[in-house]
Every structure is written in structure tokens, then in C-alpha cells.
Image: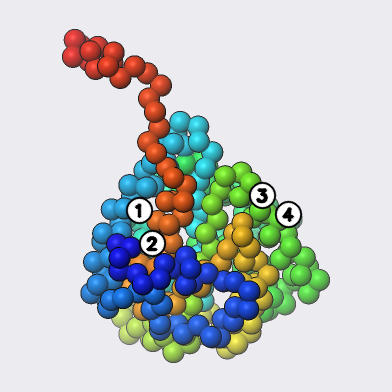
């Protein structure tokens, strides 16, 4: 699978000093050698590799290993967050996956700091956790619509960095992905939903309203990426106009994160030979 990449997404898509979101072409396929057909083959092969690594992570968690992985997905409406969960994470063993989608906070959640409800959903040891939207909504939509004072939004960037550094200290690999879509592609995807009765349920009139704030959202993302891409929890911007590329890029990032843990199967806490002998006699 890795041979299909000229440049590993962990290098080509990482947000570093001087990063500018406007310079990223949402229709590009940086670092990948092939076309859509090749990408589909890579996705299928990668699912096998990802699942094998995820099962090792889960097995080690059962045995007391504290490590885990948290994938944070952000992006404009229709950028492919749900599809990424379904076609990438959905190909792994479900017992080892913890998925959480953060909607508008409830009245009870608003009585606490914005990170309170997020901290309660951090994946347990051995789990592959996924936040489909996350605590970043509190510096994106709330910044765009001025739902919190400017000083509070500023405070949150630092609070997020401190929170994520604490996760890393606990053995949690934080992988943050922004799926970067163009306004033209978003319009095409919304149009498709309105043209297909089977997709009416996916259409939200508010999505069209939010398109009117496109530039403000791009600015909010630029600031969030600059302020919160750290060594402990870096951001990766994945061009998402081509769904097939976005999926293989996220898959490769996940595989790389798990490979970096150097996972091995846990050693048995019992005498294997003795248990084999007992089983034969049973």
C-alpha cells in the first residue's frame, strides 16, 4: 500500500510553520501516484492492514496497555466526514472503535467549560476513537457567528493545546484531520442530495445558509490550524473534493499512527503448552 505514495501523507499533508489553507487545492491528490481506480485498490488493501493493527491495539488494551488513538475529523458540511467514518474506520473491527459526534451542546453541557463534555468521551485504552466534529466547533462556528466573546474564543485555543498535550501524556495518539472541500464541490454534493429522494434525509437547509459564511469559515479554520497544530497533536489538511483520495489519505494517516506505536501481540499470562495439554485431555 505504501508504494502507491510518492510522499507519505504524514509529511505532505501536515500543517507546519507558514501553512496557508488558501494554498491547498481541494481537488488535488498530493503525494499519490495513481488515479481513482488505483485509489480504490489501495483502500481495499489498506483496510486489511489497518484492521490488523487496530486489533493489536485492542488486544493490548485488554491486557492493560494504556495507549489508544483518537481521530478528530473536521470539515465544512458535505466534506466527507461520515463517508470517511464508514469507508475507513468502518472497515475495522467494531468492538475496538468508539465513535462520537458532537452536536450543539445541551443546556446541561453549557453549564460546564466547553471541554467538559469532550473529556468525558476520550476513548478507553486499546480503542480507536473517532470524533466526527469535535471541540473545534467551539472555535469555528462559535467564532464565525460570534456565539462567544472574542476573549473567550482566544482562551480556548490555549485550553485546547493544553488539553491535547495532556491526552498525549496519557498515551493517546491524537490525529487531527481537516477535510478540505471547495465551495463548488459542496454545491454539487448538496445538489445531488436535492435531486435524489433517497438522499433528502441527508439534506439540511441550514447548510445553504452556512455557505454564505464560507470566507469567514476559511479564516476561522486558518486561525485554528495555525494556533493548535502542535507536536503533541498535529493537524493534517486532506484535500476532499475527490472522495476516494480523502479516504485513502486518512487511512494512510491512521496506519502510520498505529505503526508508530510498534504494536505487538500481548504475551500470554498462562503456560501455553500446559493449556494445550489440558485442552487435548478435556
Marks 1/2 in contact by CB < 8 Å: the verdict is yes
Q: First in sequence: mark 2 or mark 4? A: 4
Marks 3/2: CA distance? 25 Å
Q: First in sequence: mark 1 or mark 4? A: 1
Mark 1 or 4, which is nearer the eye?
1
Marks 4/3: CA distance? 19 Å
Q: Which of 172 and 1 lies nearest the eye of the viewer?
A: 1
Badge 3 crowding class, 10 Å Cα cut-off, few under 14, some 14 to 19, many 20 or more, is few
| Mark 4 secondary-structure assignment | loop
Marks 2/4: CA distance? 34 Å
Residue drawn 51% across and 76% down? 76
Q: Circle 2 sits on which residue?
A: 251
Residue drawn 68% across and 60% down? 160
Quarter placement of the C terminus: top left
Residue 29's quadrant in the figure? bottom left
Is residue 205 among the parts visible in the rendering? no
Residue 203's quadrant in the figure? bottom left
Q: Position of residue 184 (x, y in %)?
A: 44, 89
Left or right, 38 with respect to 150, comes to: left
Q: Which of 127 and 191 lies nearest the eye of the viewer?
A: 127
Q: First in sequence: mark 3 or mark 2? A: 3
Question: Against 103, is 150 above or below?
Answer: below
Q: Circle 1 sits on which residue?
A: 50
Residue 111's quadrant in the figure? bottom right
Q: Circle 4 sits on which residue?
A: 112
Residue drawn 56% across and 81% down? 21
Tell me, for residue 166, which label it has, or none.
Answer: 3
Mark 4 or 3, which is nearer the eye?
3
| Mark 1 secondary-structure assignment | helix
Badge 4 crowding class, 10 Å Cα cut-off, few under 14, some 14 to 19, many 20 or more, is few
Amino acid at each position: 500500500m505504501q508504494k502507491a505514495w510518492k510522499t507519505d501523507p504524514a509529511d505532505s499533508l501536515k500543517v507546519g510553520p507558514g501553512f496557508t489553507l488558501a494554498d491547498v487545492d481541494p481537488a488535488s491528490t498530493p503525494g499519490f501516484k495513481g488515479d481513482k481506480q488505483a485509489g480504490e485498490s489501495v483502500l481495499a488493501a489498506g483496510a486489511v492492514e489497518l484492521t490488523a493493527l487496530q486489533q493489536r491495539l485492542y488486544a493490548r488494551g485488554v491486557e492493560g496497555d494504556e495507549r489508544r488513538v483518537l481521530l478528530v475529523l473536521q470539515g465544512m458540511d458535505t466534506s466527507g466526514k461520515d463517508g470517511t467514518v464508514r469507508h475507513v474506520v468502518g472497515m475495522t473491527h467494531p468492538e475496538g472503535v468508539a465513535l462520537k459526534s458532537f452536536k450543539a451542546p445541551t443546556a446541561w453541557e453549557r453549564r460546564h467549560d466547553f471541554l467538559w463534555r469532550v473529556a468525558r468521551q476520550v476513548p478507553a485504552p486499546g480503542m480507536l476513537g473517532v470524533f466526527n466534529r469535535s471541540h473545534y466547533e467551539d472555535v469555528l462556528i462559535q467564532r464565525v457567528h460570534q456565539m462567544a466573546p472574542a476573549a473567550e474564543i482566544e482562551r480556548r485555543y490555549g485550553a485546547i493545546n493544553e488539553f491535547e498535550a495532556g491526552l498525549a501524556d496519557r498515551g493517546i495518539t491524537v490525529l487531527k484531520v481537516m477535510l478540505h472541500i471547495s465551495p463548488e464541490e459542496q454545491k454539487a454534493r448538496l445538489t445531488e442530495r436535492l435531486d435524489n429522494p433517497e438522499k433528502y434525509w441527508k439534506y439540511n437547509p441550514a447548510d445553504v445558509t452556512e455557505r454564505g459564511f464560507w470566507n469567514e469559515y476559511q479564516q476561522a479554520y486558518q486561525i485554528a490550524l495555525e494556533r493548535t497544530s502542535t507536536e503533541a497533536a498535529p493537524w493534517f489538511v486532506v484535500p476532499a473534493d475527490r472522495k476516494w483520495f480523502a479516504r485513502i489519505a486518512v487511512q494512510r494517516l491512521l496506519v502510520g499512527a498505529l505503526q508508530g506505536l510498534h504494536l505487538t501481540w500481548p504475551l500470554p499470562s498462562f503456560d501455553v503448552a500446559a493449556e494445550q495439554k489440558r485442552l487435548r485431555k478435556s
